[in-house]
Image: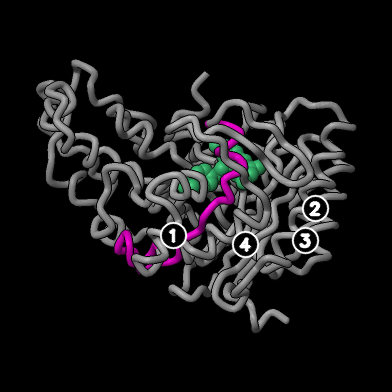
Amino acid sequence: MAEDYAVKYELLHVEKHTGARLGKITTPHGEVMTPMFMPVGTQATVKNVSTRELREIHSQFILANTYHLWLRPGDELIAQAGGLHKFMDWDGPILTDSGGFQVWSLSQHNKISEEGVTFRNHLNGEKMFLSPEVAMRIQNNLGSDVMMQLDEAIPYFETYDYVKNSVERTSRWAERAMAAHKRPEDQALFGIVQGAGFKQLRKQSANDLVSLDLPGYAVGGLSVGESKEEMNRVLDFTVPWLPENKPRYLMGVAAPDSLVDGVMRGIDMFDCVLPTRIGRNGTLMTKHGRVVITNAKYKNDFSPIDLDLDDYGSTHYTKAYLHHLFNANELLGQNIASVHNLRYLLKLMEDMRQAIAEDRLLDFRAELMENYGYNKK
Ligand SMILES: CNc1nc2c(CCc3ccc(C(F)(F)F)cc3)c3[nH]c(N)nc(=O)c3cc2[nH]1
């Protein structure tokens, strides 16, 4: 069965003291090592960063968004351009989210039914309809290597019955997505496990989706305002219900400590907008915690931005220069800070893969928590 899937996962090593694993994902656009971090490129661009720079900092997978690209410039236009890879000059793997979560978080008046979600286009107020089939058609046109099923994104603190009904709908929507899937040999469809904080519902969701034998699985419905402890509690019982020989994607997880905690629990793939979002405001992610470059103390600091990193900006520009760029509202500052933060996270994952290979992930975690300042009381 697996050979006719577009995406294959190979488990290379399980870390001796934790649930962390080293793996390789083979896609139609190349192989990537896991655990990995995927830069988010919502509207066919990782904001303020060119694909040349993404290649320079060894990005592997990048993300793009069904909802945004459907609304603008339109998935048909991107199909005419030859697909998203050609349109944005990215020849590595691309993952697209199904848009359900973005509808829920971006647009008003959304009404959900068994058929799908009706909502108002947040750009022009036009009434739109997104169903499991429409989400597949759009991602088909985008040509992404990994497509996410349309799932029902729900508030975390809902009642058991509400969440149970929603989980069962998401399972039915996964089957409809499979039925509408045109090219399983070119594009992999991942299921999304829901169930909020309810162990039985997470189990039901995982069992329903695993029985469909999809090429990969995401754990959804997390990083939506619940505490880190709550997220880890849900991961502790959910991840073991996912198959060991398939990739596991934890959606929307950002901070360095959450990445390590997810990896320790067997997660292979992460996406987060954090590095480019805080980069745009001049906040740098460094080995010793966050550096807010707009702080006056950097005005005359002529030391390199970050000697622990190897991206061009971190080694060729000074903190004083970056401080000036943000003070002067020069867009180059956003580019330098965003590339820096992406490289920080990509390098963090490279170092984490090395730590897993050498069975010293717990030491790596302790060092990260100390250096990054998580243990500061
Ligand atoms: C931030 N927290 C979070 N993000 C979540 C996301 C979005 C992930 C995403 C994917 C692609 C992009 C793109 F802009 F690059 F396209 C941007 C963000 C979820 N997505 C779905 N489908 N189900 C979920 O249950 C879910 C839970 C999520 N928690």
Q: Which residue lies at the image location 58% right of the left edge and 26% below the top edge?
A: 108
Residue beneath label 3, please?
Answer: 175
Q: Identify the secondary structure beneath mark 4.
A: strand
Please state, as top left, top right, bottom left or bottom right, where the N terminus lies in the image.
bottom right
Residue type at tag 3: Glu
325 versus 336 height, above or below? above
Which of the 4 quarters of the picture holds residue 156?
top right
Q: Does the stretch in magenta take in 161?
A: no
Q: First in sequence, mark 1 or 3: give its number.
A: 1
Q: Which image quarter has ligand 1?
A: top right
Q: First in sequence, mark 4 or 1: give its number.
A: 4
Mark nearer the viewer, 3 or 4: 3
Magenta span: 84-106
Other residues around mark 1 within 10 Å, as few (<14) / some (14–19) / many (≥20):
some
Residue beneath label 4, please?
Answer: 21
Residue type at tag 1: Glu
Other residues around mark 2 within 10 Å, as few (<14) / some (14–19) / many (≥20):
many
Residue beneath label 1, please?
Answer: 76
Residue 142 is left or right of residue 184, and the answer is left
Q: Are marks 3 and 2 in contact (CB under 8 Å)?
A: yes
In three-dimensional space, the C-alpha distance between marks 4 and 2, rounded to whole angstroms, equals: 27 Å
Q: First in sequence, mark 4 or 2: give its number.
A: 4
Q: First in sequence, mark 3 or 4: give its number.
A: 4
Q: Position of residue 38 (x, y in %)?
A: 46, 53
